[in-house]
Amino acid sequence: MARKQNLVPAVGYLRTSSATNVGADKDSDKRQRAAIEAYAKRAGYAVAEGDWFYDADVKGSDPIETRDGFGKLLDRIDGNGVRTVLVEDASRLARELMVQELGIVLLIARQVKVFAANGDELTETEDEMRKAMRQIAGVFAELEKTRLVKKLRLAREGKKAKTGKCGGRHSMLERNPYIVKAAKELAAERHMSLQEVSDALHAKGMTSKAGTPFNKLVVQRMLAVTWPDVERGIAAYEKRQGAAQ
């Protein structure tokens, strides 16, 4: 009895440039998949059914980092440890050389090897020009990462400066501004104490997430909210509710 071959797991990547070549009656993805499967069989690789990633109607010049299928491929690699990507040929990554090399750089950074269906290893090259382009692509990839981190940090700082918070639990104004409005109306119209406001809200069915009356500190925070902020909170709340319907 022949010993069963131990196949190396891999992921397959497909790309079709035009929507006119996408669909059940088209053969672009089928051709690419057949070529990859034939190479995988020859070379001892196995691509599981859930490990095929396809960017349909994506031009070869489109930035590699904006592609949904390629992004999911990177997530899969990060999550399951597969270190081999199979493509029909280098043009499936991209037709423009710089875009192609950036995609390869992103995979090399994950210790991934990329093979074309003819057996060429796209992550290894003696071409000095390609080596230089990969170095340049690597610099731009790192620059873009740094720019994104800075952009997110500035956005967080801007939100904190505007709202006084960034992340964490939702305030009562975010959770339900109508409770804040009711608390302020009770305190203003009836001159209630913090505990009395809490009791009155509880009687109206306005409670904490646990179903208990609000403690005095929470009531105090609600009363400190300005009326313009209450109005803005209600407008934002209604917008969210409308979008959810």
Image (cartoon, rainbow, N blue to C red):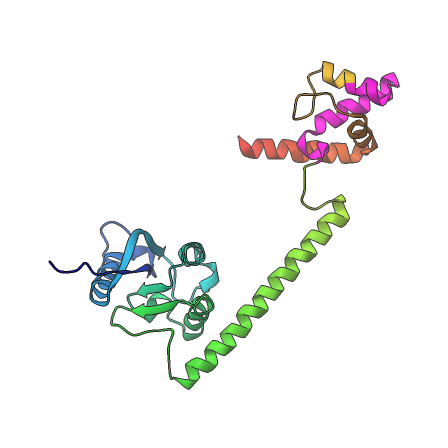
Q: Which residue is at 46% across, 79% downward? A: 133
Q: Which residue is at 75% across, 19% downward? A: 201
- Left/right placement of residue 10 relative to residue 150 reads left
Splitting the image into 4 quarters, where does residue 155 fall? bottom right
Q: Is residue 178 magenta?
A: yes
Q: Is residue 245 magenta?
A: no
Splitting the image into 4 quarters, where does residue 225 fall? top right
Residue 189: percent from left, percent from top: 86, 18
In this rendering, is residue 65 above or below 209?
A: below
- Left/right placement of residue 156 relative to residue 142 reads right
Residue 56: percent from left, percent from top: 35, 55
Front one among 27 and 219: 219
- Which residue is most to the right? 191
Question: Which residue range is magenta in the image?
Answer: 171-198
In this rendering, is residue 197 above or below 82?
A: above
Residue 17: percent from left, percent from top: 34, 61
Q: Which residue is at 37% across, 60% downward? A: 82
In this rendering, is residue 236 above or below 103?
A: above
- Which residue is most to the top? 203
Q: Main secondary structure of the magenta part?
A: helix
- Left/right placement of residue 36 relative to residue 162 reads left
- How many badges with numbers are in the image? 0
Residue 135: percent from left, percent from top: 50, 78
Quadrant in which the N terminus appears: bottom left
- Which residue is most to the left? 1
Front one among 187 and 20: 187
Q: Which residue is at 32% across, 74% downward? A: 121
